[in-house]
Amino acid sequence: MAQFDVYRNPSKKTSKAYPFLVDVQNSVIDQLATRLVVPLTTSNTKNSFYMKKLTPEIEFEDTTYLFLAQQLSSIPEDVLHDRIGSLEQSRALLIDAIDFAITGI
């Protein structure tokens, strides 16, 4: 598993709203049985509370998604099976969003 790999959301409950999960965990803590992930949702879900820096728009599979940094969570590593791509090319943007969620800067 690599940082910024994208997986299909395995949850039947949430996969419609959040079809993809981005693995944001650094390999320095690969020994854990969990992964830190951030969901992607379609960009048409933007509302009046949309914050560009916190939820940047990301192009993936010819569709625009929002990276929901405020929904950073941990899930068991063994549920992430269906790797379908990477957002490594957006690394700086994704780290900025997570940093903004934590530090406000």
Image: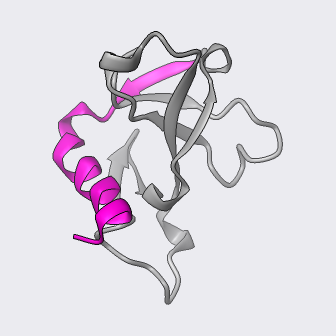
Residue sitting at 38 percent across and 42 percent down?
60
Which colour style is shown?
one colour
Quadrant into which the C terminus falls: bottom left
Q: Is residue 55 shown in magenta?
A: no
**Rendering coords of residue 104 (x, y %):** 29, 71
- Front-most of residues 22 and 15: 22
The answer to which image quadrant residue 17 occupies is: bottom right
Residue at x-position 42% and y-position 13%: 30
Q: Residue furthest right?
A: 13
Q: Residue at x 33, y 49 (%)?
A: 59
Q: Position of residue 1 (x, y in %)?
A: 42, 14
- Residues 23 and 85: in front is 23
Residue visible at 36% across and 61% down in the picture: 102
Give the tally of numbered discs: 0
Q: Is 62 drawn above or below residue 30 in the view shown?
A: below
Does the image show residue 83?
yes
Extent of the magenta region: 82-105
Q: Quadrant of residue 74?
A: top right
Residue 100 in magenta stretch? yes
